[in-house]
Image (tube, rainbow, N blue to C red):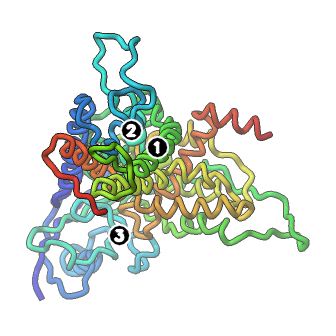
């Protein structure tokens, strides 16, 4: 067993600072284990949100050595422990206390997105039939655990604070799941272009990089949506082609 | 602040793209040593006007303004250049490496204003699919160049015979890599089937979508391999033409 230094941000919305804690580390530990060890033995008032400790609840999102990560999925053996490990709250959201941020903005954004509206049932039993290949694309986006790491790493929100004009990668793939759904009848493209600000995304793929569920957010969600917006707004030859086909 | 070497990747992209831009610009302005035997440099193909036997419409037109520099490459390179400039992979890469927007993931930015791709000039990136249409034509032209590179003229009689040189293979690999890059394009993936919500109703479109998706999964890899190889192909033809390299005939 060896010791390592954890530099944890302590404070609230008014301000704060990093504080160093030294604790023992052993094989198999993750960052959340170290935070719990510190919380139990050195800083009982250290605030940290967590739940499943299995990378499925999306609660323990934080920034470990400057990168947005789930603390429960960040193995200490993957970190350079000869230097202090910094742990700080997500930068894209307002701080509540220590490692906890107020992510309620995300829930308000979700309410703004037009809901699923299926076509009338067309099967004899009054329901629908969906081909597997039609639903495969959408299923990938449903793996999202809403940890909001993608929102945190997105520079449009993180650095440029465009929270009022851009819904962020999480809700772009949420929209993609609805928009590509084989039963859905709503058209969300005009909202995507204007109110939801899809044009702000400049395809850095950072959201994909930090996703703990390995969802191909950019390639399979955001870019296909951008292309659908191009269909409607920036492709004059496409408009002519569609008119000729009718 | 990230303590790791986050700057490595953007630096490599900057150096890689920078080196290609410098070399390709230099090569495009040369106007010489772009063909050798049956080989034609991809920077100069299609040769719409030019002095080589590969030219479609003969030498430089008489109406070309005297004050304007002429090179067959300058007539065409804007099209594949436009494809790469507006490519979704390259956009993300050069916004980071050349414009620090952001420099890397979770690394702060040197400026406060941000417009993204929703207003001029970057809204023009939406023209990407038009460059794709042109790029598909270029891949077809370059494939015909490979066919032509299989026919070698005898030095004395001028009679052509079927053969294979190292240069033929260099040109063929170039077409394969450019094809893998072009046919893995995100815009093509959308146009070929991605726009549909019910792919099952169009089996041919679904199969094409799967095929493009397959190339698309490694789009970054194909982008870099094809970029390097198209530059190398020009260099190969150039050095053979200059007599620096010898083109080995396999048969």
- Chain under numbered label 2: B
Image x and y of residue A116, in percent? 70, 57
Mark 2 or 1 closer to N-term? 2
Q: Residue at x 60, y 54 (%)?
A: B194
Residue to which mark 2 is pinned:
B45
Dot 1 crowding, Cα within 10 Å, few <14, some 14–19, many 20+: some
Image x and y of residue A164, in percent? 48, 40
Against B182, is A123 above or below?
below
- Chain under numbered label 1: B
- Does the CB distance between marks 2 and 1 fall below 8 Å? yes
- Does the CB distance between marks 2 and 3 fall below 8 Å? no
User: For numbered disc 3, what is the local secondary structure?
Assistant: strand
Residue to which mark 3 is pinned:
A70
- Does the CB distance between marks 3 and 1 fall below 8 Å? no
Disc 2 to disc 3, C-alpha distance = 51 Å
Residue B169 figure quarter? bottom left
Q: Nearer the viewer, mark 3 or mark 1?
A: 1
- Of B216 and B49, which appears nearest the observer? B49
Q: Residue at x 40, y 52 (%)?
A: B175
* Residue A165 can be seen in this image: no
Disc 2 to disc 1, C-alpha distance = 7 Å
Classify residue B198 as left or right of residue A139. Answer: right
Against A154, is A85 above or below?
below
Residues at marks 2 and 3 on the same chain: no
Residue to which mark 1 is pinned:
B141
* Residue B206 can be seen in this image: yes
Dot 3 crowding, Cα within 10 Å, few <14, some 14–19, many 20+: many
Image x and y of residue A121, in percent? 85, 64
Q: Residue at x 17, y 83 (%)?
A: A25
């Amino acid at each position: 067993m060896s010791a390592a230094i954890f530099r944890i941000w302590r404070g609230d919305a008014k301000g704060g600072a990093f504080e160093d804690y030294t604790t023992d580390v052993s094989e198999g530990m993750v960052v959340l284990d170290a935070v719990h060890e510190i919380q139990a033995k050195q800083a009982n008032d250290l605030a940290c949100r967590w739940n499943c400790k299995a990378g499925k609840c999306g609660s323990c999102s934080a920034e470990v050595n400057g990168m947005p990560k789930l603390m429960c999925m960040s193995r200490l053996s993957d970190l350079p422990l000869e230097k202090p490990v910094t742990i700080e709250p997500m930068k894209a959201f307002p701080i509540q206390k220590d490692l906890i941020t107020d992510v309620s903005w995300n829930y308000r954004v979700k309410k703004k997105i037009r809901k699923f509206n299926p076509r009338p049932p067309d099967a004899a039993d009054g329901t629908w039939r969906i081909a597997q290949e039609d639903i495969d694309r959408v299923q990938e986006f449903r793996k999202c655990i809403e940890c909001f790491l993608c929102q945190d790493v997105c520079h449009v929100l993180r650095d440029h604070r465009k929270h009022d004009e851009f819904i962020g990668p999480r809700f772009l793939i949420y929209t993609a799941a609805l928009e590509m759904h084989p039963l859905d009848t709503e058209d969300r493209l005009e909202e995507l272009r204007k109110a939801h600000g899809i044009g702000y995304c400049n395809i850095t793929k950072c959201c994909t990089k930090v996703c703990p569920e390995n969802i191909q957010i950019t390639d399979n969600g955001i870019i296909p949506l951008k292309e659908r917006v191009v269909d409607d707004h920036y492709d004059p030859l496409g408009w002519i082609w569609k008119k000729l086909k009718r | 602040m990230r303590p790791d070497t986050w700057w490595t990747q953007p630096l490599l992209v900057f150096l890689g793209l920078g080196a290609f831009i410098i070399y390709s610009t230099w090569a495009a302005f040369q106007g010489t040593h772009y063909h050798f035997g049956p080989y034609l440099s991809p920077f100069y193909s299609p040769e719409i006007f030019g002095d080589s036997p590969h030219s479609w419409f003969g030498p430089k037109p008489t109406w070309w303004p005297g004050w304007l520099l002429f090179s067959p490459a300058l007539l065409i390179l804007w099209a594949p250049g436009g494809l790469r400039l507006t490519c979704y992979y390259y956009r993300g890469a050069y916004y980071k490496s050349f414009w620090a927007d952001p420099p890397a993931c979770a690394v702060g930015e040197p400026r406060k204003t941000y417009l993204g791709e929703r207003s001029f000039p970057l809204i023009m990136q939406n023209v990407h699919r038009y460059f794709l249409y042109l790029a598909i034509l270029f891949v077809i032209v370059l494939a015909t160049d490979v066919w032509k590179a299989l026919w070698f003229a005898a030095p004395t009689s001028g009679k052509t015979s079927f053969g294979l040189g190292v240069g033929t293979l260099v040109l063929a690999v170039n077409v394969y890599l450019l094809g893998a890059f072009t046919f893995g394009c995100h815009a093509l993936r959308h146009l070929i089937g991605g726009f549909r919500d019910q792919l099952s109703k169009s089996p041919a479109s679904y199969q094409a979508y799967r095929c493009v998706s397959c190339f698309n999964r490694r789009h970054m890899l194909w982008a870099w391999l094809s970029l390097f190889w198209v530059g190398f192909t020009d260099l190969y033809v150039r050095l053979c033409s200059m007599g620096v390299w010898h083109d080995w005939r396999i048969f």
